[in-house]
Amino acid sequence: MADYYTKLSFELDCTEAEADRLIAAFAVAGGEAAMPADLASHFPATDPGDPLSGIAAFYDGAETFDVGACIDRRPGGVWIHGDGDPQVIAIAEFIRRLAPSALPTGFTWANDCSRSRPGGFGGGYALITHDAYEVFDVMALLGDALEAARG
């Protein structure tokens, strides 16, 4: 049996207020969580009866959610890191909505496996702008490059 992991670690330069908002967003977890008032305008509810529905959308419909990464304050910004199952989409969307001074920006991640398995290793990157984010997977990029090279 093999265990699969996603790992990431990066620093993000942002304002103190943006760091505060990011830290608060990372703390919202679980089905019993409450949406901090200063975050509500950044994640408008998609379901009027569920104030967390605007943030839950980034967790693939899970009833409980966890960003799967840690966030630590550092001079001039934050350090975001995780080595189990960080939620890349949620992290990218948090940065896009809560740290506009950092944009455009991006981060990389690695996919790892406890045993040698075909397709068990890889990674990708997220490119984040004011308007959107895009997620790129290195296996897909390699496939596209090979297809182009083969004509």
Image: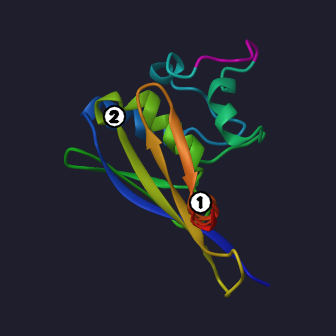
Q: Nearer the viewer, residue 131 or 3?
A: 131
> Can residue 134 be seen from the camera position used here?
yes
User: Mark 1, residues whose alpha carbon is within 10 Å: few (<14), some, or many (≥20)?
Assistant: few
Disc 1 from disc 2: Cα separation: 31 Å
Q: Residue furthest front?
A: 151
In the displayed structure, 94 sits above or below 77; it is above
Q: Which residues are magenta?
A: 44-49
Sequence-wise, the earlier of marks 1 and 2 is 2
Chief secondary structure of the magenta span?
loop
In the displayed structure, 39 sits above or below 23; it is above
Q: Number of marks in the image?
A: 2
Q: Quadrant of residue 141?
A: bottom right
Q: Residue at x 76, y 15 (%)?
A: 49
- Rendering coords of residue 125 (x, y %): 49, 54
Q: Nearer the viewer, residue 39 or 89?
A: 89
Label 1 sits on residue: 148
Label 2 sits on residue: 103
Q: Residue at x 65, y 83 (%)?
A: 114
- Rendering coords of residue 9 (x, y %): 41, 61
Q: Quadrant of residue 98?
A: top left
User: Mark 2, residues whose alpha carbon is within 10 Å: few (<14), some, or many (≥20)?
Assistant: some
Q: Is residue 115 shown left or right of residue 96?
A: right
> Can residue 27 be seen from the camera position used here?
no
Report the mark closest to the observer, 1 or 2. 1
The amino acid pointed to by label 1 is: Ala
The reply to whether the magenta stretch includes residue 133 is no
- Rendering coords of residue 74 (x, y %): 25, 51
In the displayed structure, 112 sits above or below 60; it is below
